[in-house]
């Protein structure tokens, strides 16, 4: 099968970008001819992508190009003409490529994979300015609540009319979690569910938790990831258990402020900011971790970092909304706490550090095995190939 994968950008460091590369590799191993198209806003020019469409991080240009990006549409037409795909699989499009790429795909059967809120939320996080979860459908309320300015809201009326009309016209929409499926349904978008996979641990991976508690956070250092909440909760834990340590892996615009908060809380000696690490380096950190922490303020659409920890036997402490609640089983593979609840997060850290929860600092073999099977790349590739075959068959039948 000839498959054209399309993703908004390819930085190589985010979950969606990593997934696109896993999917391309897995489909190629299965015998498919697969090409990847990304925007030039990321690192697509490094040769990772087979086709590159114009995209920019300049805010003024984005204000118009997010409505319709004719340059990206032209690149997609060229890719379709040169490659002649039997299926197009779009992973992300709303930030750089715009809805215009769907028209450029012509009659190519198209599957849209949805892993974020950009199709239903103008700021992409479903998170209100006060840090609480948004539970209403996008509309004038977005301006009333202070999420967007009036000019932003007015622009988005045209943008979202294009998004919704194009999304409803694709062959199949697939969400990465039941939670996200529900958010799409609330916006009138029907979707199937297919959880994302993760690569297996390295063959030589062995857990080796140290005697004193070590907690690990991996993710973007943005507001919605809840690291400031984590630092405050960890400071409360440190007052009781001075030997506890926290390692923070990741980069982002929030790092300077988070380092300032850590200093203000007197955590300089117990919190280490490691910056961006490669997957093997992150796996090395997971060897030591008593628990992997996912304290997100927003409702994570999925939660790859939680799956990566569980299949390596690392308990997960995570906020309870979003896709994380479908990954982390309370008391079995981790502990869940209400989003943005500092006291509840502190309780989870304390229970883990005291050994009341997961006294061996590792998950059972059965839990790890079940997660590894559920989220294996091989299984995901089989499911995706079956989906592509169904869509192609339906398209062929419609032409008769």
Image (cartoon, rainbow, N blue to C red):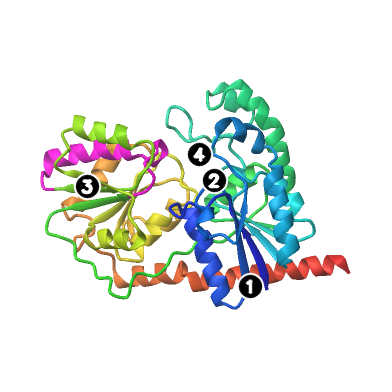
Residue depicted at x 55% and y 66%: 24
Residue range highlighted in magenta: 218-243
Question: Callout 3 environment at 10 Å: few (<14), some (14 to 19), or many (20+)?
Answer: many
Task: Judge the density around disc 1: few (<14), some (14-19), many (≥20) Cα neighbours within 10 Å.
Answer: some
C-alpha distance separating marks 2 and 3:
33 Å
Tell us which disc is closer to us: 1 or 3: 1
Q: Residue at x 22, y 35 (%)?
A: 262
* Label placed on residue 240: none
Q: Earlier in the sequence, mark 2 or mark 3?
A: 2
Percent coordinates x, y for residue 252 in the rendering: 38, 41
Find the distance from the CA under tag 1 to the CA under tag 4.
34 Å
Q: Which mark is residue 41?
A: 2
Classify residue 226 as left or right of residue 198: left
Question: Which residue is painted at 53% across and 71% down in the image?
Answer: 26
Q: Earlier in the sequence, mark 1 or mark 4?
A: 1
Sequence-first disc among 2 and 1: 1
Q: Are the two marked residues, 3 and 4, in contact with CB atoms closer than 8 angstroms?
A: no
Packing grade of label 2 (10 A; few <14, some 14-19, many >=20) is many
Q: Residue farthest to the right?
A: 400
């Amino acid at each position: 099968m000839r498959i054209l994968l399309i993703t908004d950008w390819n930085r190589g460091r985010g979950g969606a970008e990593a997934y696109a590369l896993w999917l391309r590799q897995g489909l190629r191993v299965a015998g498919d001819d697969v090409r990847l198209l990304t925007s030039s806003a990321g690192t697509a020019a490094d040769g990772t992508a087979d086709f590159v469409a114009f995209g920019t991080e300049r805010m003024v240009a984005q204000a118009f190009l997010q409505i319709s990006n004719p340059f990206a549409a032209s690149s997609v037409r060229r890719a379709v003409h040169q490659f002649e795909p039997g299926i197009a699989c779009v992973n992300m499009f709303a930030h750089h490529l715009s809805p215009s790429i769907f028209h450029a795909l012509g009659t190519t059967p198209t599957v849209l994979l949805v892993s974020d809120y950009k199709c239903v939320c103008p700021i992409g996080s479903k998170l209100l300015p006060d840090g609480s979860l948004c539970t209403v459908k996008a509309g004038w309320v977005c301006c009333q609540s202070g999420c967007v300015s009036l000019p932003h809201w007015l622009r988005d009326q045209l943008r979202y009319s294009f998004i919704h009309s194009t999304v409803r016209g694709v062959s199949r929409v697939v969400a990465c979690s039941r939670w996200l499926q529900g958010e799409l349904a609330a916006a009138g978008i029907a979707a199937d569910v297919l959880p994302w996979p993760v690569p297996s641990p390295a063959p030589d991976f062995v857990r080796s938790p140290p005697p004193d508690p070590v907690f690990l956070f991996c993710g973007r250092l943005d507001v919605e990831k809840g690291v400031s909440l984590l630092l405050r909760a960890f400071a409360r834990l440190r007052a009781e258990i001075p030997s506890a340590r926290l390692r923070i892996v990741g980069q982002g615009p929030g790092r300077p402020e988070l380092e300032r908060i850590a200093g203000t809380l007197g955590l300089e000696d117990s919190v280490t900011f490691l910056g961006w690490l490669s997957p093997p380096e992150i796996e090395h950190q997971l060897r030591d971790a008593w628990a992997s922490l996912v304290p997100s303020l927003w409702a994570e659409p999925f939660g790859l970092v939680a799956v990566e920890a569980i299949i390596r036997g690392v308990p997960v402490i995570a906020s309870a909304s979003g896709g994380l609640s479908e990954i982390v089983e309370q008391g079995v593979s981790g502990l869940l706490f209400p989003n943005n609840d500092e006291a509840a997060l502190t309780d989870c850290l304390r229970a883990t550090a005291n050994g009341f929860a997961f006294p061996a600092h590792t998950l059972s073999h059965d839990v790890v095995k079940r997660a590894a099977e559920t989220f294996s790349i091989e299984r995901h590739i089989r499911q995706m190939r079956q989906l592509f075959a169904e869509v192609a068959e339906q398209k062929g039948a419609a032409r008769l």
